[in-house]
Image: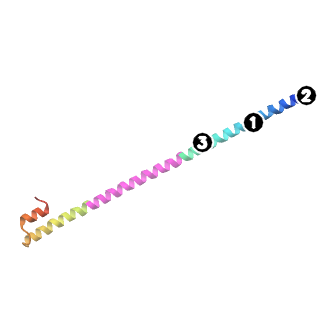
Amino acid sequence: MDKRLAEERAYVEGRFEDLKRYVDKLFADMKSYVDGRLGEERRYVDGRFADMESHVDGKFAELRAYVDRRLDRLLAGYSSYQEFFMEYLTAEGLIERGKAELLKGGG
């Protein structure tokens, strides 16, 4: 009886080990699948972030160029207006020619 009980116990333990290996393999396969899917999704999201960052950087560069152009035009207009105003005041005799040149930045 002890021999038969030992054989049955060995059989059950063997089956248990087989089932344990099978379940471990299933979990490993599942983990591999999930890790693969998460890796794909992460690469996709990272790619989208990179695209958005590139797009925002491009828009920021466009905005900076636009603001620079507008400021250049504004400064050019101000400079022209300042020169015109100095010429006008000089022509009216309100400012001497030397002082007008000094105010215009001509030296």
Badge 2 marks a residue whose secondary structure is: helix
Task: Point out the frontmost of discs 2 and 1.
Answer: 2
Q: Position of residue 30 (x, y in %)?
A: 67, 41
The answer to whether residue 42 is left or right of residue 11 is left
Task: Point out the frontmost of discs 3 and 1.
Answer: 1
Quarter of the rendering containing residue 37: top right
Neighbor class of circle 2 (other Cα within 10 Å; few <14, some 14-19, many 20+) is few
> Where does label 2 land, which residue?
2
Neighbor class of circle 3 (other Cα within 10 Å; few <14, some 14-19, many 20+) is few
Viewport quadrant of the N terminus: top right
State whether the magenta stretch is mostly helix, strand or loop: helix
User: Would you say the residues marked 2 and 3 are in contact, meaning their CB atoms lie under 8 Å apart?
Assistant: no
- Residue 77 vs 53, above or below: the answer is below
Task: Kindly give the residue lying farthest to the right in the view shown.
Answer: 1
> Where does label 1 land, which residue?
20
Amino acid under disc 3? Gly
Quarter of the rendering containing residue 105: bottom left
User: Would you say the residues marked 3 and 1 are in contact, meaning their CB atoms lie under 8 Å apart?
Assistant: no
- What segment carries the magenta color? 43-71
**Residue at the (80%, 33%) spot, across then down:** 15
> Where does label 3 land, which residue?
36
Badge 1 marks a residue whose secondary structure is: helix
Magenta stretch contains residue 94: no
Amino acid under disc 1? Lys
Q: CA distance from mark 2 to mark 3?
A: 50 Å
Q: Position of residue 13 (x, y in %)?
A: 81, 32
Q: CA distance from mark 3 to mark 1?
A: 24 Å
